Amino acid sequence: MDRVVEERRKSRKYDILLLGATGYTGVLTAEYIVRHLPVDLKWAIAGRSKSKLESLSNKLNDLDPERVQPEIEVVAFDDSSQLDSVVKNSKVCISVVLYWQVGEIVVKSCVENGTDYIDVAGDIPWLRTLIDRYHDAAVNASIALIHLCGVLSGPQDLLTWAAARELEQKTSLKTKELVLSMTEFKLSVSGGSASALLAERPYDPQQLEEAKQPWVLSPIKRPQTPIPANFLGMREDPTLGLLSATSIGAELDRPLVHRTWALLQDTDQGYGPNFWYNEYSKVSSTVDGISHMLTSALMRTVLNFGPTKRILGLILPKPGEGPDVEKERSSRLKFEAVAIADTDSDSPPRAYASFSYPSGGYYTTALFLGEAAASLLYTRNLEGRFAGGCLTPAFLGEDLWRRIREAGAVLQLNMI
């Protein structure tokens, strides 16, 4: 761990600060911390409502009354001095707030107060703004800002890193393409996710158009290339099977993974100069693929049409609500990835990586947030010898891979 980081942490009251703890994802993350992180962890749950925080605290105490219980911090996010007072007393901040409302205030506080930070923000224009405003300052201050560390991007980014590394270690070849399959995944919506989907963002048309570009978060720009698929939007892979270019997270994951590629490019962890990332949903047949395509088109239409968005606002979960926790707990998911070597061979070497977890997306997000925080707290060994900046889950690399495996995720990595 960097000596500068170690020195500034010595007198801090909290190991981990969980901001937005009373939301649906926040509660699951708090419960994950209680069940999996060390019992002597010094941490705090923070939010606007004292009564909700007290209710959560009682619930956490019932889960494990023998461990150190979290402190309660009531925070008004629009009061910078109040926010700063708790952030500067914390070593790592997990932020699951409504990002487009108060997210930048939290990031700014973490950078100014020397606190490592993790989020699950699924908003490309917002992330572009953060990178422009805070990356250099975070690099200079050795502050790690780990973005999109949830189910829609965390496993994908980590699998890409693992497969590309496996390929190079076994063949000395770089990766030309990473193909990822959402093999098993059931989409469910919490109140926070619903708010993000339905919110009217303050972005101009140019920002929205730029957000669609696959290299928008990358410091290295490259031409946009078509996603390999036939006229029905499908592709057959010898390992992953029949795939449809309808993955719900592709537009988010592609810019994130390409940012990882660019930042690692000049390090010993580089994926290769010709790398690109493509993401799909696994389908059982051509008919199933067409059904996925039509469903995806319908969802986009609904979300872009004012009257239907207003109707959705009446029926989707409200902040703090979400899918049934027991059903979510038993909703298994699996992602698979293949790294294809950058070579002229007709049969290039391929490395395979997979991630599966016995619980659904929100539990997977809690897994990644909790173990990423533990990685920054106890190890903080960032890939590519980075000390800070606007980074991605892959920068937690080997340590995060080990931690999520020990916490119950099933990980596979091999040549095929």
Image: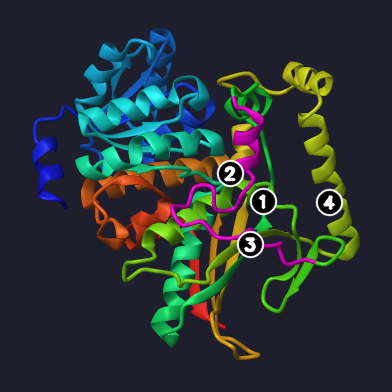
At horizontal 41% and vertical 50% (from top left) the residue drawn is: 392
Q: Nearer the viewer, mark 4 or mark 3?
A: 3
Please say if the residues under marks 4 and 3 sit with CB atoms less than 8 Å apart. no
Q: Which residue is mark 2?
A: 361
Secondary element type, mark 1: loop
Count the numbered circles shown: 4
Amino acid at dot 2:
Gly
Q: Residues within 10 Å of mark 2 (few under 14, many from 20)?
A: many
Based on the picture, tell me whether residue 216 belongs to the magenta stretch: yes
Q: Nearer the viewer, mark 2 or mark 3?
A: 3
Find residue 57 and report its horizontal and vertical position in percent.
36, 20
Secondary element type, mark 3: strand
Q: Nearer the viewer, residue 190 or 227?
A: 227
Q: Nearer the viewer, mark 3 or mark 1?
A: 3
- Quadrant (top left, top right, bottom left, bottom right) of the C terminus: bottom right
Q: Upstream in the sequence, badge 2 or badge 3?
A: 3
Secondary element type, mark 4: helix
Left or right relative to 206: residue 339: left
Is residue 406 in view from this perspective? no
Region in magenta: 203-229
Amino acid at dot 4:
Met
Q: Which residue is mark 3?
A: 278
Real-space Cα separation, disc 4 to disc 1, in angstroms: 16 Å
* Residue 293 circle label: 4
Amino acid at dot 1:
Phe
Q: Which residue is mark 1?
A: 185
Is 74 above or below relative to 152?
above
Q: Residue furthest right?
A: 287
